[in-house]
Image: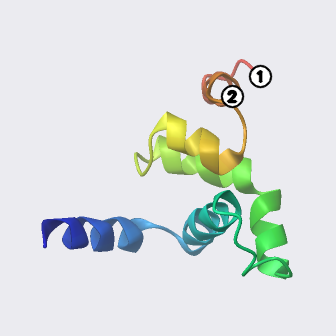
Amino acid sequence: MMKINESVKFISSLSYDELLLYIYSDDVQKGEGMSDNSDEKNRIFGNRLTIATNMVKTGKVSIARGAELADIDVMTFREGLNGKS
């Protein structure tokens, strides 16, 4: 029961764009194509670095998960967070 509560709390903390990035990124990683023809997916993926960066800065996800969501390697993502890009 605790795991469900934690999941609900996490999902509830996400903005609309953060939630879509989380869902669409998972969809792509699993090789599923439910969102292949989605204009929203294209908009979200066009802003994925900004969205993922915000998620890390607000403590919603780890740096490693942020890099996955941004679709870049962890080192590059970390450098961007530190303003070294």
Residue labelled with disc 2: 80
Q: Pointer 2 and pointer 1: residues touching (CB < 8 Å)?
A: yes
Q: Position of residue 52 (x, y in %)?
A: 61, 49
Q: Earlier in the sequence, mark 2 or mark 1?
A: 2
Is 60 in front, or is 69?
69
Q: Left or right: 53 with respect to 3?
A: right
Q: Position of residue 80 (x, y in %)?
A: 68, 28
Q: Distance of mark 2 from mark 1, alpha carbons?
A: 5 Å
Residue at 63%, 64% in the rendered image? 21
Amino acid type assigned to the residue bearing label 2 in the image = Gly
Residue at 46%, 67% in the rendered image? 14
Q: Which mark is residue 85?
A: 1
Q: Disc 2 on helix, strand or loop?
A: helix
Residue at 40%, 45% in the rendered image? 59
Q: Position of residue 30 (x, y in %)?
A: 63, 62
Q: Quadrant of residue 5?
A: bottom left
